[in-house]
């Protein structure tokens, strides 16, 4: 298997910084949202040996994480697909990824408020009791997602 490194987030977006206190959690979250965005925008055709994966790499200031495309270098369709995705990755988050990032931020704020006893568990909206954001309809604008799925 071969890998093409795509990055931790789209190129024009800011990302968690290696060495910051919350790097591990923030980078895991960003990479997971980015991985899902790539899968949504560029679904892997059936039978093609390609996967979007988050990988960690050593760095002078600690371990960093980024999303990669894993592909079978002996499968011509996989090679072509992987390189086409690399050329087509958007520079910014799509609306669903923007919503997911906001959802995680709000969920973390509610979790901290409960932990610090500023809120009672029953005061936290039920959709923050899940592990992942809700399944969102493709093609929606960010404002439409916020209206349909308030944070």
Image (cartoon, rainbow, N blue to C red):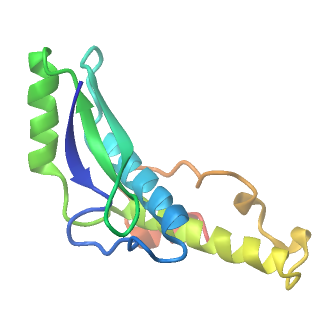
Left or right of 54, for residue 149: right
Identify the residue at horizontal 48%, vertical 69% (top origin). 23
Q: Residue sitting at 51 percent across and 63 percent down?
A: 24
Q: Is residue 9 left or right of residue 26?
A: left
Lateral position of residue 67 relative to residue 150, left or right: left
- Let me know if residue 81 appears in the view: yes
| Residue displayed at 71% across by 52% down | 130
Question: x%, y% of residue 145?
Answer: 49, 65
Number of marks: 0
Quadrant for the C terminus, please.
bottom right
Q: Residue furthest front?
A: 60
Q: Quadrant of residue 4?
A: top left
Quadrant placement of the N terminus: top left
Residue 41 placed where, x, y %?
A: 28, 45
Measuring from the top left, give residue 126's x and y in whole percent. Answer: 78, 60
Horizontal and vertical percent position of residue 138? 39, 50
């Amino acid at each position: 298997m071969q890998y093409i490194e795509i990055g931790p987030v789209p190129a024009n977006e800011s990302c968690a910084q290696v060495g910051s206190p919350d790097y591990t959690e923030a980078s895991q979250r960003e990479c997971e949202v980015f991985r899902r965005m790539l899968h949504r925008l560029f679904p892997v055709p059936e039978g093609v040996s390609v996967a979007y994966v988050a990988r960690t790499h050593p760095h002078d200031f600690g371990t960093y994480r980024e999303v990669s495309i894993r592909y079978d270098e002996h499968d011509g369709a996989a090679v072509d697909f992987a390189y086409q995705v690399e050329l087509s990755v958007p520079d910014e988050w799509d609306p669903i990824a923007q919503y997911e990032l906001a959802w995680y931020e709000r969920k973390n704020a509610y979790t901290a408020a409960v932990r610090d006893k500023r809120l009672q568990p029953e005061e936290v909206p039920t959709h923050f009791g899940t592990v992942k954001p809700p399944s969102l309809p493709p093609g929606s604008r960010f404002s439409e997602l916020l209206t349909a799925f308030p944070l």
